[in-house]
Image (tube, grey):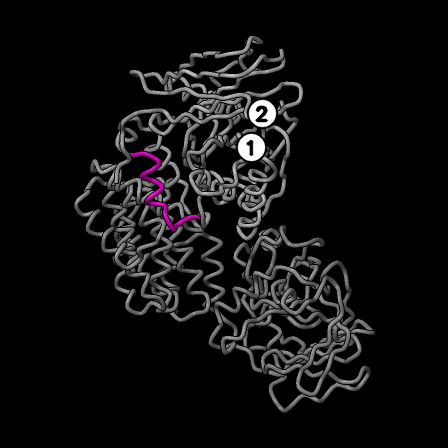
Amino acid sequence: MHERTAKLLGIAHSSPADLQFDDLTLAKVPVIPTGLRSLEELTADHAEELADIPAVAILGLPALADFTVELEVGNGVLRLLPAGQPPIPAADGPRHAPDTPGDQDATTWSTRYKTEGAGYWLAGVGPEDFALRVRLVTSGWDTVIDSTVADLLGSPGGDLERVLLGGINAARYVALRPEDLSGTPEPHPDLILGTNLLSTFRLTIEPTAETIRFEQIREPRFPVEERAYFVARADEDAGAIESFLNDHPSSRLASEAGTVLLSLRLDEYPPDPGAISRAVRLRAQSVKADRSARTMVEFADELLAGRREDRHALSRDVLLVAKEAAPQALNARVAHEIQARLGLIALQQGDLKQARRHLLSAAFGMPRDPLVSLWLGELYERTGKPARAWSRYLQATLGDDAPPEAFEGLNRLNRDPTFRASFTMADAQQLLEGRTAEFHPPDRYDARSASPDSPSVSLVEFFTCVDQAQTLAPELAFGGLLEFFGSSQVAFIEYHLPAPEPDPLVSAPSASRAAFYGIESGPVVCFDGGRMVTDGGDGSATEGLYLAYKAACLAGPEPARDWRLDGYARISGEEITGRIELLGPQASDALRLHVVLCEQMVMLSGANGVVLHRQVARSALSPEDGYRVSTEPGRRVFEVRCNPAHVAAALERTVTALETERSIQFRMRPTYVDPGLCTIVAFLQDANSRQVLAGRALPVATGREPQP
């Protein structure tokens, strides 16, 4: 049974189920849930015949072990008789072999079969008494001969004149289809019987005795044209296959033959444009009219993804054929997909005006299609409109089938200093509004209110990993907490760790702070170096975690503030400079002042679904173990400075080392540091007790306003 159906019915592996067929019940049949791609394809190809009811199960012979089974495939009849009951006499009808040259063969055959592995096996004999292992199945139309066996017998195309099953010559009833059967489950068969052969016979199966009887009940017609196609396919004779398609356009093999012919024509060198054009049209005509346009679009995609020098001209011709078939398509979307690919061809050939016309036409019909957005992004980037390009790349990354090139486009623009001089992550935040996972608290902390709950902590440190799904709720809740407190006296730092998955937002302070606390992976939220919350979860857990974080910040009496941090940070030329003043009483030798450069918003998509990350640690501006604090009471002054370009270069080296260590390549490398969105976070901590005594966030003064 198809695994999805089994799950729907609550059926576990090998659990028994009762199958009801009108007045017949098969009781306690063991069911094996598994993926059944063949049934999915059957349902898709024969929806009309199945009255849109999907095929979801295959009935195995063990389910019928208590019966004598009579199967008339050609008449669509399955009879279940009491075990041992004599078979029903055959109705009046032909009992002779097909009208073909040679000796007349038997029309009935009884034999024992053997159960081995996952199949039922009969003995067969080919030319020159070549022994054949024959597998009996009812799941495929063609009778298939292993291509190696056919070659050994001197007929690579399967055009054998004698393949005996007892006294029945199967080669006179059906055209044998050569296929490589080495990939089938062991033991590998030499011949697999298809329903094209079985439909001529009545099969009477006695499962308890493992016997089977073949009795001819229908007049067969030998498919001469199918044999000719199989021989032409084996010989790779494009001309013969083209003739087959012209002579038999409605053959059941037409779709396959169209695909084979097109492949052969494309492989010819030098290419014959006329022959390829004919093959394209025959391929389009070989499928149902309502699928022809879709088939051609998929073929155009294959061509465009290849390296043929003539791929653009060929793809355009294919798309024009698709355009002719589009009015019959099941889905009107295909007409817009054709426009999109024509736009891509024009874009790749440098005709930007034509590319814009086609792509905007496609976008009108498919406004959220990721490929259309990607190609429009590439168009805008090439025409000097980087902000519009960024927006289109972003749109392309937000779907389930986001193309990797869209992330590369975002990464390229995000790391372009010229573009970032006029486009910040604050602008990105506006464009992302409502498109990605986010959380905004309903209220805000107001220190001026009559009875505010003063924060009992001064520093919140968050350890996370973008490619860990369970960090979604903690990261959203952390952002909500930052939004709640705003620019109050609570400072926030977000550290990214390469565990359990690699994370390109790793930095030196992330590693050192995690080592200081003994944290190996996120999510972990640490309040003033003491209490830690390690809960994770998906989006549904966000509000609960936010309330827990908020309570941790406001719970208990406000601690005595013996220490006070103050200062400033600003951009001076190409550097960020800062002055931090620490005022407090006599200090112990264990006190350390840590200074971290953070970026207020950094863009990176990951498995947790968050796109913009807040207060991300980018560089340590103090020694790894912090500045030593003078034990004398009073004011201590610390000067800090950094060059954002140098910080970016260090982050680039860190990301490269991580890629080398993990043998991966990140789609985005968020190493550009925007000076205008930086914050210097300073905090005083006791290295022995880990208690944070004071914390302060100093935004870098720049004068640059976010772009609308």
Q: Which label is found at residue 692?
A: 2
| Residue 22, horizontal then vertical, whole percent | 66, 86
- Dot 2 surroundings within 10 Å: few (below 14), some, or many (20 or more)? many
- Compare residues 505 and 624 and report the one nearer the observer: 624
Q: What number is the disc on residue 704?
A: none
For badge 2, the amino acid type reads Val
Residue at the location (70% across, 59% down)?
133
Total tally of numbered discs in the picture: 2
Q: Hey, which quadrant is residue 673 in on the image?
A: top left
Label 1 neighbourhood size at 10 Å, few (<14), some (14-19), many (20+)? many
Quadrant position of the C terminus in the picture: top left
525, above or below 627, in the image:
below
Q: Quadrant of residue 282?
A: bottom left
**In this view, 313 is above or below 203:** above
Tell me the tag on residue 457.
1
Left or right for 615, reference 280: right
> From the viewer's perspective, is residue 370 above or below residue 453?
below
Q: Quadrant of the N terminus?
A: bottom right
Q: Is residue 611 visible?
A: no
Contact (CB < 8 A) between labels 2 and 1? yes
The stretch in magenta equals 423-439
Q: Is residue 100 magenta?
A: no
Query: Residue 323: horizontal and vertical position, in percent?
Result: 26, 61
Is residue 576 rendered to the left or right of residue 144?
left
Please give the name of the residue rendered at 27% of the width and 27% of the height, measured from the top-left corner.
703
Earlier residue among tags 2 and 1: 1
